[in-house]
Image (cartoon, rainbow, N blue to C red):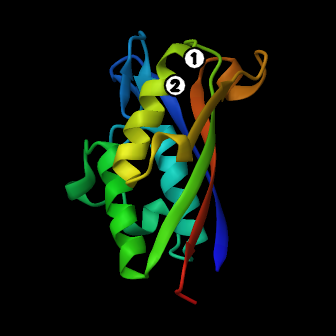
Amino acid sequence: MFRIGFGYDAHRLTSDRLLVLGGVTIPYDLGLLGHSDADVLSHAICDAILGAAGLGDIGRHFPDTDPRWRGILSLTLLTETVEMLKLKKLRIVNVDSTIVAQRPKLKDYIPEMESNLAAALGLDPGQVNVKATTTEGMGFTGQGEGMAAYAVALITGTAG
C-alpha cells in the first residue's frame, strides 16, 4: 500500500523572532511568528505525512492552545509524527517540499535543511528534497509579509 499526503503552512514575518526553516537558523532581520519555532517547512512536511496516514493535521496533534508545544523545535514535532506512523505500521518513502519566500535567498541552506529533516524523519538525506522559490514580488510572500511552504509525502505500510 502506498499513500500520498499534501501539506501547506504559512506564517507572518516579524522582527522579534529567529528565522528557522528545516531546523536551520538562518541569519535574517525577520523571523516567523508562531506558537512553536514557526518553521513553516517542517510544519508543511508534518501535515503531508499526517495526511498521507489519514491522521488529520498538525493542529489536531500539536495545538497552539497547548502550552507543551510553546516554543518547541518543529523538528521535534516531525519526530513525534514519525512515532505516530510507526504505531500504524507505516513508514515514509520520501518527502518533497518547496519554501515560498522572496527573501532571504535560501539555496546555501538547503543541504543542511535536508540533512536535519532526514535525521528527524529517520530517512536518508536522498529521501528528502527541499526547493525554494519566490513569487516575483506578488502576494504576501512576495511582499515580504510572510513565508509559506508546500510538501508532499509518500508513505507505505500495511495499515488500512
User: In the figure, 114 relative to 43: above or below?
Assistant: above
Please indicate, yes or no, whether residue 129 appears anywhere in the rendered image. yes
Between 38 and 64, which is closer to the camera in this rendering? Answer: 38
* Horizontal and vertical percent position of residue 29: 41, 9
- Looking at the image, residue 21 sits to the left or right of residue 134; the answer is left
- Residue at 76% over, 15% down: 137
In which quadrant of the rendered view does residue 102 lie? top right
Above or below — where is 142 with respect to 149? above
Q: Is residue 149 left or right of residue 136?
A: left
Q: Residue at x 59, y 39 (%)?
A: 129
Q: Which disc is residue 52 wearing?
A: none
Image spot of residue 107 (x, y percent): 57, 17
Image location of residue 148, percent across then percent down: 60, 36
Sort mark 1 into few (<14), some (14-19) or many (20+) by Cα contacts within 10 Å. few
- Quarter of image, res 128: top right
Disc 2 residue type? Ile
**Element marked by disc 2:** helix
**Viewer-nearest residue: 3 or 101:** 3
What residue did someone put label 1 on? 107
Secondary structure of the residue carrying tag 1 is helix
Residue occupied by mark 2: 110
